[in-house]
Amino acid sequence: MPAGRVETRWASPENPSGEKGAGAKENAGRKGRPFISIPAGGEAVLAEARGSSGTVRRIWLSFGERSPRLLRGLRIQMYWDGAARPAVDAPIGDFFGHMQGRMAPFQSALFSSPEGRSFVCTAPMPFRRSMRIVVRNESGRELPNLYYDVDYTIGDTHPEDMLYFHAYFRRENPTVLQKDYEFLPLVRGRGRFLGVFFGVIADQNKYSFTWWGEGEVKIYLDGDREFPTLAGTGTEDYISTAWGQGRYDHLYHGCHVADSEKMQFSFYRFHIPDPVYFYEDIRAAIQQIGYLNPRWMGLVHQLGTKLYRAGPGLVERGPLEEGLFERQDDWSSVAYFYLNRPENGLPPIPDAAERMRGLD
């Protein structure tokens, strides 16, 4: 390829290698291979480029059975510049914002699902020498029809301080009483925190329909240990709404699932107009704090749940005492960030059984 020339490639089932002049060969060019299948325990390379710089610019995919088992059992991984460990590692549903094994239509600056049947990501993902995007089927059943497009360019000129795209999934079910849920464990290096998708299934058996979202986001930067540099004022405040959260989807923040009957919530925040930079390390967490209001006091009292005041120690709250309390729920998340190296050193994500537990 001539120096300074940037070329466009699409990797799809009709041209898996993305090679020039190699698309739509099946069935005499009449839509011969629009999808692939992945057997249980198998894997498929969606896109791969070697020997060139480039940028992944758009990923779109869909499949027929969008059940919790497949949304959490399919695992997407992305490798940059020949790294041994993936920079992106997450269940396929959660990576694209469909948390808790549940599809929902939404639109944001980086991810979308126009009618709740597809998976779209347009976050730029640069590489210097190579890239590889893999889907692993850990669901325990065959995936008969995976449709996909990975749109990328090759020959891009990147600056010396280029950063690699990373994404990391976590789940705690339940969270630990009086311990902040860590959605991004400690990462060392220089980079930019891009944002996060959260999924919450609030525990009705313990807390009835009480409000679960008083916890504050805390981001520890460049040597922060006991206390963070960045601290918010509440869960719904972090995603730019207030006094609880209903369903909405905006470019940089939203709550695309707000099911108050099942007590399931999916929401996000992207730090695009308000960048979060780090130069040595970063860690991010959110508190697990709820609010007991008079409306639900009687139901919570009937459940027999011990409530502890938010604060130091475990000080039990009276059954009819309004206010903040510590709580435990099912939290999951995918954190997105850019880093100055293709590996992040984070621990492995939970296995498929733990990712799917309780969702079916």
Image (spheres, grey):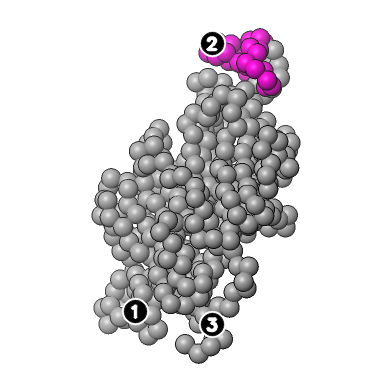
Q: Relative to the observer, which residue lies in front, 100 or 217?
A: 217
Question: Of the numbered discs in the image, which one, if any, rests on residue 24?
Answer: 1
Which of the 4 image quadrants contains residue 83? bottom left
| Contact? badges 2 and 1 (CB < 8 Å) | no
Seen at 70% across and 39% down, the residue is: 228
Q: Is residue 334 magenta?
A: no
Residue 20 visible (yes or no): yes
Q: 307 or 126, which is in the foreground? A: 126
Q: Residue furthest bottom?
A: 2
Amino acid type at image mark 2: Gly
Report the residue marked by disc 3: 6
For numbered disc 2, what is the local secondary structure?
loop
Which image quarter: residue 47? Answer: bottom left
Magenta residue check for 298: yes
Is the C-beta separation of discs 2 and 3 under 8 Å? no
Report crowding for label 1: few under 14, some 14 to 19, many 20 or more residues within 10 A (C-alpha): some
Question: Alpha-carbon distance for marks 1 and 3?
Answer: 23 Å
Q: In this rendering, which labeled residue sits more in front, label 1 or label 3?
A: 3
Task: Residue type at mark 3: give it.
Answer: Val
Instruction: Name which of mark 2 and mark 3 comes first in the sequence.
Output: 3
Within-10-Å neighbours for mark 3: few <14, some 14–19, many 20+: some
Magenta residues? 295-320
The residue that label 2 is drawn on is 304
Q: Give whichever of 33, 126 is nearer the camera.
A: 126
| Residue located at (53% from left, 27% from top) | 176
Q: Residue at x 56, y 86 (%)?
A: 4
